[in-house]
């Protein structure tokens, strides 16, 4: 079926303003925030913006009958090409379907449509003293639908976990247009062990099993107090050792971030007034939250533990000082992009996850890989759960540098698997990490493939992703 016919069919289901068909409009949907998929972009035939389950059903039925690929899309902040339509077809943009359907305070849950932006949801929930804890750095842009599809998380995952822990139930339109409700048809329960856990199957399925059209989320009471401990280490190995000491003392911080020497230098070069100690091999930032008494106890104990190995430690609950201590971490991603005046930070190989015991060694190995391939890399990340962010900096217009970064990123992914970790702790597989699926999952990959085939026999749902 040619694209004119597909566009005409969409206009029979949707209003004119819900169908984008101009070449320029559809071109913006040919990529997401990943670097590697930007190198080989494919325009969709049409972009649709449905705003009801019935509309999504009709689109899926049409696509199923005619074997047309469908790529669900939130805000396109994904770093793996997940929302990029590798085979053309229909891109289903769910951003404009952004209704908060119900805040059920009595049952500590909220029901939303997929296009709600994460930060908007938390702003809304704050009025009820509630919050949805996963906290991606893209909070002000990414949608809840995209977070569920990618099982997103952030720097507070160390205490609060990933999106999956908060999803109580979903409405999903399957590739053939049928609708299912997971987690119980009428359920408002928080605990539910009835049946196979299809909710967990859908969370992190990256749009390859169906379109998520309604999300029932568990909320938590909003913590009343917060504190920050900063500790500076002359030796890299002392940073993970301190994190372990803190855990062994029975303390679970809400965040534990690391900046290695490459990140410290990048921050100082970007904003000299932050003046992080340049000679340090690593800086740790602990965040604690809860009630004021527990925050005081945890913060002061973490500071005492850190003093055993650190050359400098500071602990505060004073808001302005907290912002100042956190500033180095909050500008790291931007600072990384400026380490070379003619370069850009590219999002590739950016979120490997490794065992806590391997963090220092892996950071050293990444540094060595950067040297081997002649690419500047800046390392920082969520050391509390072993999620390392590597920022390669290259001139993306220079084909030789692009080839170098591809090789570097491949080696980083292999390193993660060899270290007993994963190619991704946050951003997912999408198009860019598919090649590692067999190495990571072995025979389990065949089971994933069988599930995919059972739900999507024609292979129309986000083809070329995940498996
Ligand atoms: C600056 C920046 C910081 C980031 N920081 C973090 C971070 O800290 N933690 C983290 O986990 N991620 C982070 N990300 C990555 C990204 O923001 C998350 O993966 C986010 O969850 C993607 O949401 P989105 O709405 O942009 O989804 P998209 O990128 O549009 O889509 C992501 C995937 O979900 C699928 N999808 C989207 N909506 C649906 C739906 N309704 N039904 C079925 N499938 C769907 C798509 O097909 C695609 O496979 C960051 C990205 C950027 C640009």
Image: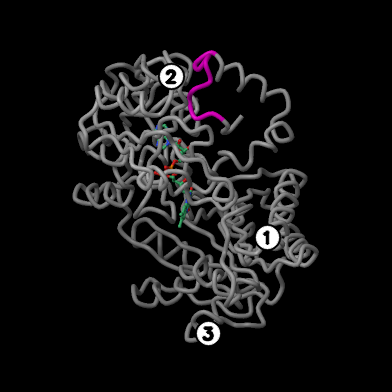
Q: Nearer the viewer, residue 222 or 35?
A: 35
Write down the quadrant of residue 249 in the picture: bottom right
Q: Is residue 460 magenta?
A: yes
The image quadrant where one finds the N terminus is top left
On residue 175, the disc is: 2
Circle on res. 275: 3
* Quadrant of image for the C terminus: top right
Q: Nearer the viewer, residue 462 or 28?
A: 28
Q: Disc 1, ligand 1: is the CB inside 8 Å?
A: no
Q: Quadrant of residue 417?
A: top right
CA gap between label 3 and label 1 equals: 35 Å
Q: Nearer the viewer, residue 438 or 264?
A: 438
Q: Which residues are magenta?
A: 454-463
Name the image colouring.
Answer: one colour
Which residue: 40% across, 20% down?
63
- Image position of 446 (left or right of 53): right
Query: How would you rate the neighbour count of disc 3 (Cα within 10 Å): few for under 14, some for 14-19, many for 20 or more?
Result: few
Question: Is the Cβ of the residue at disc 3 closer than 8 Å to that at disc 2?
Answer: no
Residue 104 in view, yes or no? no
Residue 326 placement (x, y as % from top left): 45, 71
Magenta-drawn stretch contains 221: no
Residue 166, position as x, y percentages in the image: 39, 36
Report whether the residue tagged 2 is closer than 8 Å to ligand 1. Answer: no
Assess disc 1: are there few (<14), some (14-19) or many (≥20) residues with their C-alpha within 10 Å of its C-alpha.
few
Give the mark nearer the N terminus: 1 vs 2: 2
Check the image and report above or below for 426 versus 11: below
């Amino acid at each position: 079926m040619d694209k004119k016919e597909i566009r005409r069919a969409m206009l029979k289901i949707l209003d004119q303003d819900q169908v984008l068909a101009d070449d320029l409009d559809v071109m913006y949907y040919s990529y997401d925030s990943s670097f590697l998929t930007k190198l080989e972009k494919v325009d969709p035939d049409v972009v649709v913006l449905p705003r009801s389950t019935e509309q999504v059903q009709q689109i899926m039925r049409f696509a199923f009958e005619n074997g047309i690929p469908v790529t669900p899309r939130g805000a396109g902040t994904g770093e793996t090409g997940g929302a990029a339509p590798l085979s053309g077809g229909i891109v289903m943009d769910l951003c404009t379907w952004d209704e908060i359907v119900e805040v059920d305070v009595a049952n500590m849950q909220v029901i939303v449509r997929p296009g709600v932006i994460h930060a908007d949801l938390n702003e809304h929930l704050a009025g009820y003293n509630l919050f949805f804890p996963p906290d991606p750095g893209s909070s002000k842009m990414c949608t809840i639908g995209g977070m569920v599809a990618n099982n997103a998380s952030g720097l507070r995952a160390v205490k609060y976990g990933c999106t999956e822990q908060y999803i109580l139930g979903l409405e999903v339109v399957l590739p053939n247009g049928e609708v299912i409700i997971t987690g119980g048809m009428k359920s408002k329960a928080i605990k539910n062990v009835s049946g196979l856990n299809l909710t967990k199957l859908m969370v992190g399925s990256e749009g390859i099993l169906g379109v998520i059209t309604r999300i029932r989320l568990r909320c938590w009471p909003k913590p009343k107090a917060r504190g920050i401990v900063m500790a500076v280490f002359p030796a890299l190995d002392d940073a993970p050792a301190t994190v372990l000491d803190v855990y062994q003392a029975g303390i679970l911080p809400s965040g534990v971030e690391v900046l290695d020497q490459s990140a410290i230098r990048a921050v100082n070069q970007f904003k000299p007034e932050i003046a992080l100690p340049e000679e340090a091999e690593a800086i740790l930032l602990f965040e604690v939250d809860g009630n004021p008494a527990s925050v005081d106890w945890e913060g002061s104990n973490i500071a005492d533990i850190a003093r055993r190995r650190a050359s400098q430690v500071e602990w505060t609950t004073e808001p302005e000082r907290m912002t100042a201590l956190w500033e180095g971490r909050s500008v790291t991603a931007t600072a990384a992009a400026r380490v070379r005046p003619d370069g850009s930070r590219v999002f590739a190989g950016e979120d490997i996850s490794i065992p806590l015991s391997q963090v220092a060694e892996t950071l050293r190995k990444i540094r060595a890989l950067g040297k081997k391939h002649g690419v500047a890399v800046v390392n920082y990340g969520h050391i509390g759960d072993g999620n390392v962010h590597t920022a390669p900096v290259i001139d993306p217009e220079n084909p030789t540098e692009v080839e170098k970064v591809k090789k570097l990123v491949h080696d980083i992914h292999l390193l993660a698997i060899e270290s007993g970790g994963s190619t991704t702790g946050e951003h997912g597989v999408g198009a860019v990490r598919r090649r590692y699926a067999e190495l990571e999952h072995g025979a389990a990959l065949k089971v994933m493939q069988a599930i995919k085939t059972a739900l999507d026999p024609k292979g129309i749902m986000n083809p070329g992703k995940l498996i």
